[in-house]
Amino acid sequence: MTTTLAPERTSTRVPMDPARRSAFWGGLFYLITFASSIPAVFLLRPVLDDSHYIIGSGADAQVAWGTILDLVNALTAVGSAVALFPVMKRVSQSMALGFVTTRVFEAAVVAIGVISLLTIVSLRQPGATGAEADSLVLTGQALVAAYNWVFLVGPNLMPAVNGVLLGTLMYKSGLVPRAIPLMGIVGGPLLLAVTVASMVGITHHGSAWWVVAAPIVVWEFSLGCWLLFKGFKPSPLTDGMAGA
C-alpha cells in the first residue's frame, strides 16, 4: 500500500510592519483612555459629590467599576508611550524617554487617587452616629480632597506636558499631518496655565477658563484615530525598523 503524504500547509499571514504595529497600538491605547475615562467620571459621582457617602448606603459596586476604569486609563496611558517609543526615539531619544516618564508618572498619580476612593469604600459604615460618624465623614472628605488633587495633577497637568513633548516629536518627524501635533503644541501650554491657575486658587476646576483644554482633547483623540486607522506616513525614520 502506498501512503500519500499531505502537502505541508504553509502560513500566508504577513506579519505587521513594526512601524505600523507601533502606530496601531499607540492609537488604540490612546482611544482606550478616552473610552475608560469618560464613563469613570459619572460612575464616581456618588462618592465625590456626597460628603456623607462614607456613613450612607453607598453605591460601592458602581464606585468600584469607576476605579477599575481609572486604572485602565492609567495602564493604557503607559501603553501608548511604550508603543510609540521605538519610533519616537528615532526623532529624539531624550524627548521620547521624557514622554514615557511623564506617562508613567501620570499613571502613578491616578493609581493614588484610585486607592483613596477604594479606602472610602472599605471604611464605609452605614448608620454610624456620634463621634464615630464625625470622624468617618472627616476622613472621607480628606480622601475625596486627595482624589480631586490627583485629578488636577494627573489627568490635567501631565497631559499638558505630554502634549508638548509628543506633539513636538510628531511635528518634527512629519509622521502624521502636522495640524494634529500642532494642537498638542499649542494646547499644552494653555492647559498647563489653567491647571496651575487652579492649583494656586486663581480659578477652579470646571470654570469657564477650562475651555482652553479643548485643543488637548482634540489632539489626543485625533492622534489616536489617525494612528489606529492610518498609521505613520512614509518616512525615512521608519524605513529601517523592520531590519532592526
Image (cartoon, rainbow, N blue to C red):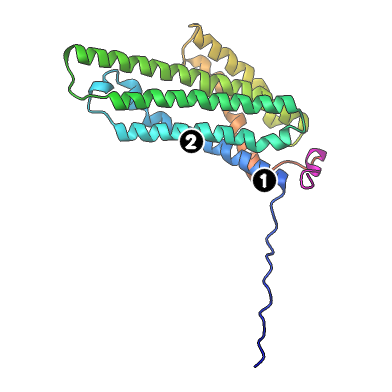
In x, y percent, where is residue 224?
61, 37
**Quarter that holds the N terminus:** bottom right
| Label number found at residue 21 | 1
Q: Element under label 1? A: helix
In x, y percent, where is residue 66?
39, 32
Tell me, yes or no, whether the highlighted magenta stretch contains residue 177: no
**Quarter that holds the C terminus:** top right
Q: Residue at coordinates 18% horizontally, 20% vertically from top-left?
A: 128
Q: Distance between the residues labelled 2 and 1?
A: 21 Å
Q: Is 124 on the left or on the right of 117, as rendered?
A: left
Q: Residue at coordinates 77% horizontally, 47% vertically from top-left?
A: 242
What residue span does the magenta drawing correspond to?
236-244
Q: Residue at coordinates 63% horizontally, 35% vertically from top-left?
A: 82
Tell me, yes or no, whether the highlighted magenta stretch contains residue 240: yes
Name of the residue lying farthest toward the front: 1
Q: Residues within 10 Å of mark 2 (few under 14, many from 20)?
A: some
* Residue situated in front as seen by the camera: 133 or 153: 133
| Label number found at residue 72 | 2
Q: Is 148 on the left or on the right of 158, as rendered?
A: left
Q: What residue type is labelled 1?
A: Arg
| Label number found at residue 153 | none
In x, y percent, where is residue 84?
67, 36
